[in-house]
Image: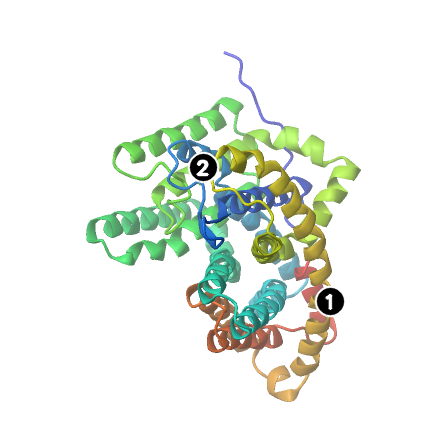
């Protein structure tokens, strides 16, 4: 029998960014924006009022589609690859855990602070100017929902040094432990009916991140193709078994809270990506493609944060201008989905590029505050811990309470602003290393 081997060179653990992984993250982001745009159901009722619902969910054909469009596990795998690469690079230059953590928090908290500040001010202004309260609340809910990702991503990337320590000493045991924890929490949640499943926000996403560590170290590069196919097939077979045992076939439903079914989908994506690496490396190795993926990576967080506010703004403009807004799932609605997607991207991409320019003034302001003795003389470990906790708290407030009230908006922005100051660069060598972490 012929053995097919996958000729993937082990990626550098300290060198430049991996173009294939950057491309995976960019394409994953593209899927998220498309999915969220299609799930926005807004139409004009018989009385001229604006009616809304989450489109696509509940449709019998949609569950199989989610096996393809649910890319969050893949995004966390790619994120783990990049995060461990960055941590090893900084560690090799003499940086400590605190410096790594504050660099990552700064990278994520700055654009989030800008978005929440602007959107919060707009929503509060709309409410006080007499806009329909239910519509403002709906916009706040839809804009806040994607923030679960930011809160979790801050948490898991903050833990990269600790998880890297475990990976370098007991990689298999760490993977098994995280998988066992995810299974135990999932079963306990199903049996008890309590919200225990949300504990898997830690187990599931840390496990996906850990798979990215494995991919960075190239431990599967020597595996023959049939073994990788077998791994992917086994994960999908176990996923089908989960469906038989009562787990939802809809991978969007399995996201909130994350379940074992989502873990198995992520494992299948991990093996599929490993199989596709030779082909993807050839494509992303071309200078033009590599340049495009690098630019996409630079603007990825701005696009993610701003796509829902821009979509909500488009809906409001269409309603205000009296443009046709057919009811979801009608023939007219489907006929307008391609123009709708084109419009969304035509608005989101340049808007994200423009608002990304607001990040620099905020960072400069934070750097000035961080230079004051009260902040600059604080122990680095304490600054890093507080920055991570406050950044997570700020995004969680916006996610759970919303941005259409002055108190939750002020709390969310205040927590994030403080996190930005605490995580801001010091002068000299530490600042240079932090710029490296901000790539």
Which dot marks residue 392?
Answer: none
Q: Name the residue beneath numbered marker 2.
A: 66
Residue 1 location (% of width, % of height): 50, 11
Q: Is residue 162 visible?
A: no
Vertical comparison of 319 with 109: above or below: above
Q: Residue furthest left?
A: 192
Residue 337 image-quadrant placement = top right
Residue 218, compared with residue 360, is above or below; it is: above
In the rendered image, the quadrant that contains the C terminus is bottom right
Q: SS of the residue at dot 1? A: helix
N-term-proximal mark, 1 vs 2: 2
Of residues 293 and 314, the one drawn nearer to the viewer in this rendering: 314
Image side of residue 155 versus residue 420, left or right: left
Q: Give 6 or 72, whichever is nearer the viewer.
A: 72
Task: Write the residue at 79% across / 38% down.
Answer: 287
Task: Give the residue number, with chain letter if any, for mark 1.
Answer: 432
> Of 333 and 3, which appears nearest the observer?
333
- Identify the residue shown where x is 35% and y is 43%: 260
Instruction: Please name which of the two marks, 1 or 2, marks the residue nearer to the observer.
Output: 2
Is residue 342 visible from the viewing direction of this image? yes
Query: Which residue of the protein is positioned furthest toward the right in this rendering?
Result: 287
Left or right: 370 as drawn, with respect to 75 = right
Q: Is residue 65 left or right of residue 108?
A: left
For label 1, count other residues whose C-alpha is less than 10 Å away and answer few (under 14), some (14-19) or many (20+): few
Q: Position of residue 213 (x, y in %)?
A: 53, 47
User: Which of the 4 image quadrants contains residue 291?
Assistant: top right
- Secondary structure of the residue carrying tag 2 is helix
């Amino acid at each position: 029998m012929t053995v097919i081997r996958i000729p993937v060179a082990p990626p550098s653990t300290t060198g430049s960014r991996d173009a294939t992984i950057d491309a995976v993250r960019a394409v994953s982001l593209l899927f998220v924006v498309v999915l969220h745009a299609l799930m926005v159901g807004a139409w004009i009722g018989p009385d001229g009022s604006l009616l809304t619902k989450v489109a696509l969910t509940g449709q019998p054909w949609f569950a199989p589609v989610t096996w393809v469009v649910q890319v969050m596990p893949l995004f966390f795998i790619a994120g783990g690859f990049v995060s461990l690469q960055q941590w090893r690079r900084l560690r090799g230059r003499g940086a400590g855990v605190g410096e790594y953590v504050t660099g990552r928090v700064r990278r994520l908290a700055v654009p989030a602070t800008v978005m929440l500040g602007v959107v919060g001010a707009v929503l509060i202004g709309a409410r006080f100017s007499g806009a329909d309260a239910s519509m403002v609340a709906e916009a706040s809910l839809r804009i806040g929902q994607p923030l679960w990702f930011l809160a979790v991503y801050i948490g898991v990337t903050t833990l990269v040094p600790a998880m890297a320590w475990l990976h370098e000493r007991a990689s298999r045991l760490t993977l098994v432990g995280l998988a066992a924890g995810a299974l135990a929490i999932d079963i306990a949640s199903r049996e008890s009916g309590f919200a225990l499943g949300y504990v898997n926000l830690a187990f599931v996403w840390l496990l996906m991140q850990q798979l990215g560590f494995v991919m960075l170290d190239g431990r599967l590069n020597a595996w023959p193709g049939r073994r990788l196919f077998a791994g992917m097939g086994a994960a999908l077979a176990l996923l089908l078994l989960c469906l038989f045992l009562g787990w939802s076939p809809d991978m969007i439903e399995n996201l909130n809270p994350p379940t074992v079914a989502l873990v198995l989908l992520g494992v299948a994506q991990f093996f599929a990506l490993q199989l596709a690496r030779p082909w993807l490396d050839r494509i992303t190795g071309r200078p033009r493609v590599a340049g495009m993926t690098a630019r996409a990576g630079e603007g990825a967080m701005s696009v993610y944060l701003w796509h829902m506010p821009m979509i909500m703004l488009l809906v409001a403009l269409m309603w205000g201008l009296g443009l046709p807004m057919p009811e979801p799932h009608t023939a007219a609605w489907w006929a307008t989905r391609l123009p709708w997607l084109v419009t969304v991207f035509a608005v989101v991409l340049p808007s994200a590029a423009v608002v990304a320019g607001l990040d620099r003034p905020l960072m400069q302001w934070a750097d000035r505050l961080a230079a004051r003795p009260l902040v600059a003389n604080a122990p680095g470990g304490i600054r890093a811990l507080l920055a991570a906790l406050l950044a997570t708290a700020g995004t969680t407030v916006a996610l759970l309470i919303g941005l259409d009230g002055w108190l939750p908006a002020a709390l969310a922005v205040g927590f994030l602003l403080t996190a930005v100051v605490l995580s801001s660069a010091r002068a000299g060598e530490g600042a240079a290393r932090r710029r490296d972490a901000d790539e």
